[in-house]
Amino acid sequence: MKYHQVIVVGGGLAGMRAALEAAKLCDTAVISKVHPLRSHSVSAQGGINAPLGNNPEGKDDSVERHSFDTVKGSDFLADQDAVDVFIGSSADRVYEMEHWGVPFSRTEDGRIAQRPFGGAGFPRTCYCADTTGHVMLHCMYERAIRHDIKFYEEWQVICLVNDGGACRGVIAISIITGELEAFMADAVIFGTGGAGRTYGKSTNAIINTGSGMAVAYWAGVPLKDMEFIQFHPTSIIGTNILMTEGARGEGGYLVNNRGERFMKNYTPKFMELAPRDIVARSIQTEINEGRGFENQHVHLDLRHLGKAKIMERLPGIRDICLHFLGIDPIDTPIPIQPAQHYTMGGIDCNINCETVLKGFYAAGECACVSVHGSNRLGGNSLLETIVFGKIAGDFASRYAKGLSATGQGKAAMKKALKEQEEKINRLLASTGSENPAKIRAELKSVMFENVGIFRDTKPMQEAVAKVRELRERYKKISLDFKGRRYNLDLCRNLELEGKIDLAEAIAAGALARTESRGSHFHLGYPKRDDDNWLKHTMATHTKDGPKLSYSTVTITKYKPEERKY
């Protein structure tokens, strides 16, 4: 059994920032499924928001205006006290990144450059060309190495140990050897990312299975607002790799098969810079009504920006187009379509990143502090990782430091280790007739088609029934490879069980919500219904599926109003 005062699960930006903060007070270790520099944070392209006022068109920006844009973008489902903390810390966290060495793009007079992003009243997105997450993650990892933070790479956490309401640590499997290990801790922080791969057509990395959310859910921690799934407007056809919103921020056009900039018909004032939920629905409407190309995509046209600007501001997506589509956006429009992108819901936690399980904290996309509500604005996700990563590390380390006794719960850890060993042995010995790859494919398909950009009652009822059918079929799977060393068949199918349970929480929450709000657009209920649905959905795990309940949205300064752009 290994022991650290604080264990952080997840080596992306939220996990890394939490670890750096916790290490100020406590012995801290990070457990990651992959080498930390292969975490999904590395793929964040367009930038990070802060109301610095460095762009001439944004000189009147303020914390107040950024906060209002965030609340309005959330379709008033965000908790406004959490948004106050979130946006109030934004400038300090961005300057901290600058001082730590993140090479932000610059204005002519040397300040951090800022570009427009969707749903924002001012250009406030700070950026490093179109590789912002990549450089932030490298900077953070170098700093973690400097501070001697211990990393356990290629370990997959499969159990969070709940010992009568107190968190005692996690059980993890070494992907390399297949051995199980009990990692005991006085406090645990999850920064495990989103659940994008529950869906087909996703911009998410293969590792984004939502396994951290599922492990917390199984341990008795509720999930919040899981029905709110963001679909990014612009992913390339085929692989669905992201084309950053920064491309539209720099002036890129969306064009249908008639050569029209069709956003003039949906949001004439904001055009391509409307929030993502609106732009994604507009693109899908163009495709559905026959104005797309090959009935599956429209064009993102950058040609008018010119070679010099594309090479300076958007070199990363140009490389992606060259390598994955064989086209150069300098002289050819990019074929794009909407794809699943972000999980607004997640592990329920408060402003301090605390959960109902004492000693267990969460930050980043796996968590739901509730600053994005029903629709996240671009540029706010990177900000969330470093704002709430810091807070999670601070509160977890002070909790661990304040305990009267450390290393509690050995009996619970040993019991959990034994149960997980038995579970894996059963899975390896299984001889069922169901093919897990087929179950995974059917799950992703039904979620994208039936709980996707446009939703309706009957398809969502079918999705809930299908997910329950898949859960029963999962009990009869068998694995092709029975060995322990690098058994990715085993690891992926441990995750598949969690994907199924998360999918049911998403679909059940969406089916119950008879209104349209942000990313959740219900064809049968196209209007927002504040009288009945201005509330958070809470999903608690039971052996028969999610038990839904609801909690209050915190409203402080901004009274709900119609969201117009």
Image (tube, rainbow, N blue to C red):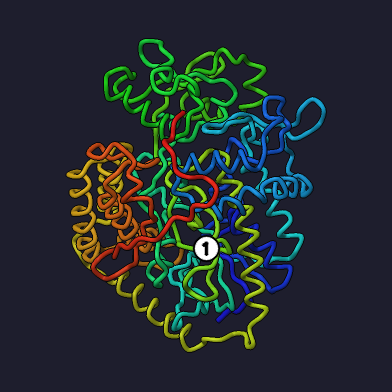
User: Quadrant where the N terminus lies?
Assistant: bottom right
What residue is drawn where x is 76% and y is 44%?
98
Q: What element carries label 1?
A: loop
Q: Residue at the location (49% across, 24% down)?
A: 272
Q: Residue furthest right?
A: 109
Give the left or right position of residue 402, taking residue 418 as reference: right
Is residue 179 in view from this perspective? no
- Residue 105, horizontal then vertical, whole percent: 72, 33
On screen, residue 525 versus residue 420, left or right, reads left
Q: Quadrant of residue 348?
A: bottom left
Q: Is residue 229 above or below residue 538?
A: above
The residue where tag 1 is placed is 350
Eyeballing the image, is 243 above or below 335? below
Q: How crowded is mark 1: few (under 14 residues within 10 Å), some or many (20 or more)?
A: some
Which of the pair 491/369 is nearer the observer? 369
Measuring from the top left, give residue 490's x and y in whole percent: 37, 63
- Point 20% across, 52% down: residue: 466
Residue 426, given in percent of the width and then of the height, sits at 30, 74
What amino acid does circle 1 point to? Asn
Q: Residue at point 41% right, 36% down? A: 562
